[in-house]
Amino acid sequence: MRSQGKTIGLVPTMGYLHQGHLSLVQEAQKYTQLIVVSIYVNPGQFSPSEDLSTYPSDFHGDILKLKSVPGGVDAVFCPHNLYSDNDNNENEIDNNENSNCGVSNCGVSNSGISVSCVEEKGFGGHETWVRVERLEKGLCGKSRPVFFRGVATIVTKLFNIVEPDVAVFGKKDYQQWKIIQRMVRDLDFGIQIVGSELLRDSDGLALSSRNVHLSPHQREKAVSISKSLLKAKSMAQGGQVKCGQLKDLAIQTITQAGGRIDYAEVVDQESLEAVEEIKSPVVFCIAAWFGKVRLIDNMEINI
């Protein structure tokens, strides 16, 4: 297709697709003539204590959803394992047949050093990682120290395999989007990175594959995240530019609803550095737990 002058777009996903993912496909259609969607639950971005073994999977359902997208998808790339191991890939990770990624019983490292499930499961053949050192440190990087290393590495591998002209990422994972942008710039990938707007359910909750794990009660209470972000944006547009007060309001709203805050930070949209007062475009980023489900959300504030 490339020899015919066709442009190729890539939409990387971890499967269990929802309307937010399908909107990424529709965004990619604006830029390219052929669309590739990858489905790969990346063990390299999970630590042994995280939810890799319970990450939702519905490969056949994903295919049906992709077939329903107006304009279509040209290819689905669904590898079993993108990490080399010492056994010449004899023990492949099966992502596709509702296997919950094939990595079960991820144990906690005895060394006390943060490791990914790839390392913990003994895939000693892979030891090369891509890091975007400053942008990965804050926000989700504080509580998930191997997450963005795993993301940047697997996205690099996907780029090298698919060789797209354009790749589309959702702004719901705002820090991830910015990290990929910087990685592409710094490593001279000839790929345009597009950020697609965050999609919400009718009640305002940001669409996420992890929402399926929320109980009906937790689902109802989790809407407090988006409500607090909307209130903060309204206050900022009304003249409240002190970030401390905006964060306090959000934290109070979410904790009163039964959530547990991981972080609530107002950061510069480019550097992702925390700001105390809004003087330029910022994004208010929140991560919170409802039960055993960790949800992230954000809202850009341009005043």
Image: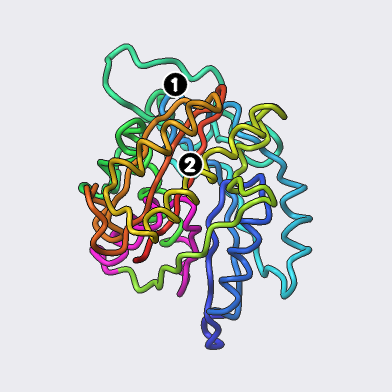
Amino acid tagged 2? Ile
Separation (CA) of disc 2 from disc 1: 18 Å
**Mark 2 or mark 1, earlier in chain:** 1
Which residue: 59% across, 65% down? 36
The three-letter amino acid code for the residue at tag 1 is Ser
The residue tagged with tag 1: helix, strand or loop? loop
Q: Quadrant of residue 291?
A: top right
* Vertical position of residue 63 compared to residue 5: above or below: above
For discs 2 and 1, the disc positioned in front in the rendered view? 2
State the quadrant of the N terminus.
bottom right
Q: What's the magenta bit mostly, secondary-structure-wise?
A: helix
In the rendered view, does 245 fall on the left or right side of 170?
left
Is residue 157 visible to us here? no
Image coordinates of residue 281 in percent, x first then y, are 31, 63
Where is residue 203? Give x, y as percent: 67, 47
Quadrant in the picture for the C terminus: bottom left
Q: Tell me what residue is drawn at x 45 percent, y 56 percent.
A: 234
Secondary structure of the residue carrying tag 2 is strand
Q: Is residue 71 magenta?
A: no
Q: Is residue 170 magenta?
A: yes
Q: Residue 229 location, x and y as percent?
A: 47, 47
Mark 2 and mark 1 residues within 8 Å of each other at the beta carbon: no
Q: In the shown orientation, is residue 164 left or right of residue 207?
A: left
Can residue 150 be seen from the camera position used here? yes
Residue at mark 2: 296
Q: Tell me which segment is drawn in magenta.
A: 161-188
Q: Is residue 294 left or right of residue 138?
A: right
Residue 49's label in the rendered image is 1
